[in-house]
Image (cartoon, coloured by chain):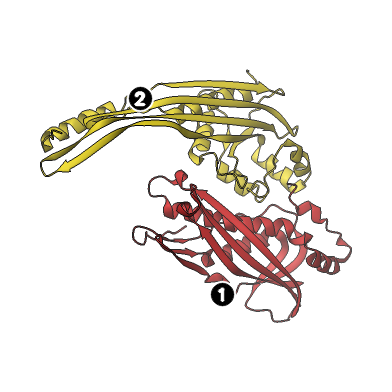
Amino acid sequence: MKFIGFQNAKSLILISLALTSLSGCVTSTIQAVREANTGMQTDDAIVVLGRRSRPTNSETELDFVSCVAKGVTNGANGLSVVSEGDFMDAMFPWFEPRTAPANTQDLPELLTQPLLAARLEEIGLRYVVWVEGSTQRTESGGSMTCSITAGGGGCFGFLSWENDSNYEASIWDIKTGTTAGRVASEAVGTSYMPAIVVPIPIIARVRKQACTSLSTQLKTFLRGDA
Amino acid sequence: MSLFGLSGCTGASVEAPVKFPVPVVEMLPVTMGLVLNAELTDYVHEEKLEKNGTWVIDIGAAQQPMFENLFRGLFANFETLSKVDGQSATHNGVIVPSITQVQFSIPSQTRTDYFEVWIKYQVQLFDEQTLIAEWPITAYGKANVRNYGLVSTNQALTAAARAACRDAMAFFALEFSAEPKIRAWLDNETGALNINPNNNSASS
């Protein structure tokens, strides 16, 4: 293997940094199932929660939940979103992993409690969006070797990996105590990292795409446009 | 929340967070005394794991804010006492919580991405100096290391400890008045007030 000097390596690193904006292809699909009419009034708010019931080991990532919440808030037709942490504290202890309602059948009983109903009214909460799912690496291949010597260093090889994001959001209508519908988002993409001296990552932003698709569709769904 | 640095390449030293919510539950119409012994408020779990270093979880600092907020939401009135003194003029009963055991697991032990923390409490209820009930509580919390970036050990273990403390509060808030011996004592103390224990019980 031929090694390069420090100055040349520096130039190549700068080039590779510029190339990091390259991104791999992502294929995404979105599906929505409506079970009831939806709509948002001016003062209505929603909360996006990740399912954390026990003892599953495939919890939805915290940053995915906050990405969806942010995505639903942003844009011209953005919705008012209560943060997951604020909601959990405001409704404590009714939405903890031990106590969170498993399905909408548990909602009416919960809402008969005056304190809880008053707190929900105070927050202005209309819909609870439960997000389940995760991003998994489904395939990986290739190899890469890197070496460092006194005169410089470098890598040689090729890596590739495929990520698959699968998420489903269940929308609960707090006013009616029923499921308003479900929105599912799937995204698949392969990332590559060729290296001739300097590795050049070409990343498929699978989870980001799944988040964007899901939040865009949720906005449309909750406003009753789809 | 305060965190300490990593101790070597493995192991960690963390302190459970001290910020907790006040539970939204139907208040029980009693004035309760709360005794927080030094054994509880100074509780530190230290464990050396083979090939994984020394792990320190300071649970004690979280106990005072945790129990005070719990009592603020659950009882009509409460006061912090230094001991069970039998002077019941101002309170109906006295609760003395203690930690009997703390366990935790790290991802390399369970081959998962999760830190897990279990805390076992023993809650004693006194009326004057008479022990009315002893109530064990097992709380559990977990946190995924992948949620906390590259330097995730301390943050994930702290999150697991916080989740365990919240779980203890949730169980206490929802099940206290349903525990048979406590229920009987509450009925006796509150007379015809007719508290419905189901109002503070989790449906799931």
In what quadrant of the picture does the N terminus of chain A appear? top left
Q: Is residue A68 visible?
A: yes
Give the amino acid at mark 2. Answer: Ser
Count of labels in the image: 2
- Residue drawn at the location 73% of the way across and 81% of the way down: B86
SS at mark 1 in the image? helix
Q: In the picture provided, is B47 more to the left or to the right than A12? A: right
Q: Chain B, which colour?
A: red
- Residue drawn at the location 39% of the way across and 60% of the way down: B51
Q: In which quarter of the image is residue B181?
A: bottom right
Extreme top residue here?
Answer: A226
Residue receiving disc 1 = B39
Where A150 sits versus B180, above or below? above
Q: Where is residue B94 in the image (x, y as percent from the top left)?
A: 71, 73
Q: In the picture provided, is A47 more to the left or to the right than B88? A: left
Q: Which of A80 and A196 is in front in this view?
A: A196
In what quadrant of the picture does the C terminus of chain A appear? top right
Tell me the yellow chain: A
Where A174 sits versus B181, above or below? above
Where B123 sits versus A46, above or below? below
Residue receiving disc 2 = A23
- Numbered label attached to residue B127: none
